Image: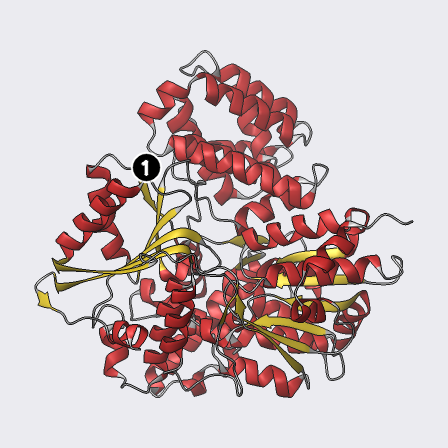
Amino acid sequence: MTQPTKLDALMDSLTTVQREAASWDDGALMLLAGPGSGKTRVLTSRIGRLLLESDPATWRVLALTFTTRAADEMRSRISEIAPEQADRLLVGTFHSFAVELLRQSGSHVGVRTDFKIYSTQPDRTKLLEEAVKSKGVDFPEPLSKAFFVLDGLRDRLVPPEECAKLFQSQQRAEYFSALYDGYHRHLLEQNALDFPAIIFKCHELLTKYPSIAERYRKTFRHICIDEFQDTNSAQYSLIRAFTGPSYRNVFVVADDDQVIYQWNGASPKRLQDFRIDFEATVLQMPTNFRCPEEVVLMANRLVANNKFRSPGKRPLEAGKSSDGASDKVRVLQFETDEHEASGIAQDIAGGISTRSGTVAVLARTKKILDGIKAALVERGIDARIAQRRDAFASVPYQWLHATLMSANRRADEDAFRAFVESGNALWGFEAEADRLIAEAALGNGDLLQSWANWALQSPASGADVPEVVTALSKNLAERSDFHAFCRTTLGVFDRNHAEFESSFASFDEDAEAWKALYREILNTVGREAPLDTFLQELEMRSKEPPLREGTIPLLTIHSSKGNEFNHVYLAGLAEDVLPSFQSKKEGPTSAQLEEERRNCFVAITRCKDTLTMSWAARYGSWNRQPSRFLEEMLQE
């Protein structure tokens, strides 16, 4: 008898509707999957099945999601199901997929394949300042506020020559057109892209050169998109350009009750567009296996007040049987926001030793989380506000990152100056970047080599410095073994850990972040991947360190998406906080207020065991009433 495979066992473990979704073959399908419904298991089961049941020489599968963490998890799960088929799978975010296409074919739209990605706001601001200066742009508004308009234009896929018609003011139309055109041309001249430009240029590639899109369609027979409700207009247009008029093998997992990124262009309307554009079949998975039954009932009562939902959307069904406990849901009331922070901290401190599993605190705004963090720390509880970090914060890891960037871009003067500046601060050098740039120009133009030659003959503090300089010269300047260089440098960092920890802020956090990122990236791209591929992945990922054991995560509702915790505290359930004052101004039936309701829906459905909600009668100097969402959730 043939032994059952991992896929067989996984398919057997699925419910009837889950198995129906995982067994879907050709054609467009929209899977309406509520929170905790097992959508990741379904998605990975389906992809693994497609790979295993097909001719491996024929085609590949493309899977898109919204975070590198989700992509890594999906890739890992599928690799366990179909380990021999890993090279037939491309899993990534919309941005990483667009980067992949531009690396291969971007020269058609003026993007050379070795383009640089600028993800941090300081880098983008510097590029914009350079564009204004080099192009002679007269821009009367603060440049720091210009990106709101520039990014919005590119998110709407509006090219520079067409943007003027979108402004009501003729004067603003003229100077924003000049700024946009100057910035766009400067990016191309520098062979650089910032994040909004990645989707913009990839869409341009696929629409201007449909034969390229057709070639990729033949390569990727199936497309799977997770968290489809989070797509903005540009991302959806990218998919439409990729698929063309007749490609239909698009499988999306979505939940219109979890659209909470309207500020980034997400909309419940996108689900209706997909159903029409792709003539998609709709399948629903409403059973929630995560939350207590009480929370499932609350979530249904809450979201039933929203009108912008898919036709025929079924309410959530409780998949966990009740254990009869009476404290699954609590509501705590306080006099002030300070009392709320202190009360939550005290409640966590009193129950942390008796409760098993994870504990997390959620709130609509970071300001509320700041107060709760201070109250937790005051009680000796380690807590951290989880938020994306685009750059390393400590000098040692800034230098390590800058060194790899300079090794990959040997003639890039901006990257070299960052490398020299951080190296001076870390190792006690007094290198002059401009002088070394001039010396390199007299030779082969290799800036890193010019620094290595200089540093080998220069005094610097610290007995370990010559070891690092020699490793740089040997492994990076003379050849490209960045793994050997990283091993040597990290060994020096470890030997000097106490000194670096006391001298450089955030050194410990960066050390943890680097180790996690290095491991994740190599698992994604393989150890044999070249330095530019490694750096591309590094640029796309947050530099936030992983949570230590016992640390309480504090998350905004937006950053909690995709997570689950045993015990969830949702703070700030007061009018003008959640829902926000701005959404209330738009009216009780507005799209903005409905999104606030979805924010609350997402927050409460993160819990697995208990949910504690709280509000205060005064926040700052303002008196507040309990949130309308509390009444909606708790009404019988």
**In this view of the protein, can residue 136 be seen by the observer?**
no
Residue tagged 1: 353
Q: Quadrant of the C terminus?
A: bottom left
Q: Say if 220 sits above or below 32 in the image.
A: above
Q: Please give the name of the residue rendered at 56% of the width and 85% of the height, measured from the top-left corner.
A: 272
Q: In which image quadrant can residue 621 be found?
A: bottom left
Amino acid type, callout 1: Ser
In the current view of this chain or complex, which residue is farthest to the front?
324
Of residues 149 and 359, the one nearer the viewer is 359
In the rendering, at what x and y percent does residue 396 appear? 43, 30
- State the residue in front, 246 or 471: 246
The residue sitting at 46% across, 44% down in the picture is: 543
- SS class of the residue under badge 1? loop
Give left or right: position of 208 versus 343: right
Q: Is residue 316 visible?
A: yes
Indicate the position of residue 431 as horizontal and vertical percent values. Answer: 43, 27
Q: Is residue 19 above or below residue 7?
A: below
Instruction: Determine whether 271 is above or below 285 in the image.
Output: below
Identify the residue at image location x=19%, y=70%: 626
Q: Is residue 391 left or right of residue 274?
A: left
Q: Quadrant of residue 297 in the image?
A: bottom left
Point out the residue furthest to the top here.
Answer: 463
